[in-house]
Amino acid sequence: MGEIRESYAVIVKKGPSQFQFWLIALIVGVVSGAAAVGFRMGIELLQSFLYRTTDINHLHTHLGRLSWMWIVLIPTLGGLAVGLILHRFTPDGRVRSVADVIEGAALHRGRVEMKEGLASALASLLTLSSGGSSGREGPVVHLAGVIATRTSEWIKADGITGRNLLGCAVAAAVSASFNAPIAGALFALEVVLRHFAIHAFAPIVVASVAGTVVSRLAFGDVSEFVLSSRTFLQFYLELPAFFILGLVSGLVAVVLMRSIFWADQLGNRVQAALAIPGWSRPMAAGLLLGVIALAFPHIIGVGYETTARALAGRMLLEEAIVLAALKVLAVSITMAGRMGGGVFSPALMVGGLTGLAYGLIATGVFPDVSGEPTLYALAGMGAVAAAVLGAPISTTLIIFELTGDWHTGLAVMVAVSMSTALSSRMVAQSFFLTLLARRNLQLAAGPQAYLLGMYSVNAVMRPLDHEHAAPFDQLEELTAEGTYVTAGQTLTDAMQLFDRTGAAFIPVMKAAFGDQPATIIGAVFQVDALRTFNRALAATAAEEHS
């Protein structure tokens, strides 16, 4: 015990050594993988209990034999429970997801909100179990982020170590969710950390493999989807069709993302107009989903049964088109209703249906130079998901590892490249980065766009008694002209004033409070702000290229 306490003291004071960090990464990977497995098992158990079925893999078929009352009531009551949880444990009634993990990596030294994250995980568990039309990967990624944050706080990790631990946890969670260790590691690097630094690669791979081992111990080494027949590509002649499929999939991905954002805006307006309490919003969404499920039970839950049918080609053209449109509608209702869950599984389902519909048309028009329609379903699944996530590399690998079919890589890569190229010009690179941009967090443009926002003017302000303080009379003149910043603002606000006025320094005001008037407490100099910005850029570049 004495040696353990001594080792802990060394880690806290000096930070972990490389070996110690790899060991911590392994432990975080195991715990995050176990959390992902537990989350999945929890959904299956609760869903089986609520819908009274022993085979949730064929839930949609089972719903056809269930009373209409339960089909409507279960998601409605599930939404009510979700609303009450979020109302009690989150300040804004919003479920935390992958976007918040990306924000934590970029702006908060690899930390995410813990209490809100745990509440979001529970809310998403109830959403997916009771019929919400979303995915389990987003909540699992944020839950892994909570585990990494707790570990970072425990060892008092700095920014680089905290971000690496966050990447380790995310990689393990994704790999455990999909039995996809390669894709899990690359997802953490490509989507969350948004760099491929060598110092982060090894521990993330270690954690990703650990998550996969945990998943395989629980579920076995099986692929999530199984193709019914060997896919076959008519090389050269058929490749142009996959280029076009990529463009179609990119447009479908944009429609999916914009539908979610539009539905959220509509929900905000309706809630404000009718003065509906926030906790009832998920219940209203659950009611709508239940009503739609009376005619189309395919929208309930994650949707893997429908996705598997699309990959197997067991669907007519009209059915594929209708179900793809309905899934977009259902996901939009779920997300706008603040019910919880992620967008990756819905993107897989919409992509599979889009690809199958396209493939049925393409092979029907050119039967002599076409392979199987299921190959188009596979490529469409990857293309839509990659565009939504903004992750062409890891999504391509996830598709391979989900299906176990490595012989169709060229078709999938072509479709993925075209879809991401098109969609990235119509949204801010991905669903997650666009979501952050809607919260006024501009991460899509890179560190140069958000680093200034990480520093308060207080951090670089020269107080009035500073050796090289600004002349007080000039500060008063600038204040009278309305050229000043308050103590709570960031360097982003200050730099905008510098650009507009050309001033060398700007007064910093302490806001009025009670009977106390607003007062000048110092000045922020442009040279100090630029020096801070340059140092932050240099530190970021050093981390990303080390």
Image (cartoon, helix red, strand yellow):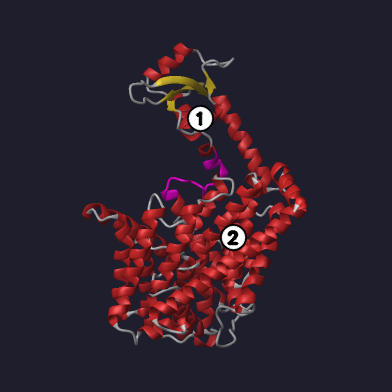
Say which amino acid is labelled 2. Val
Residue 262 position in % (x across, y down): 34, 58
Q: Residue at 48% x, 85% y: name it.
A: 313
* Relative height, residue 393 to residue 149 (above, below): below
Locate residue 266: give its quadrant.
bottom left
Residues drawn in magenta: 437-451
Q: Which mark is residue 170?
A: 2
Q: Mark yes or no: residue 507 visible.
A: yes
Residue 217 counted in the magenta span: no
Where residue 360 sits in the image (x, y, percent)?
45, 83
Q: Which residue shows up at 43% across the image and 70% down it? A: 128
- Is residue 438 covered in magenta? yes
Residue 339 rendering spot, x and y as whole percentages? 38, 63
Q: Residue reaching furthest left?
A: 274
Question: Which numbered tag is attached to residue 511?
Answer: none
Which residue lies under the disc numbered 1? 457
Q: Residue at x 36, y 77 (%)?
A: 322
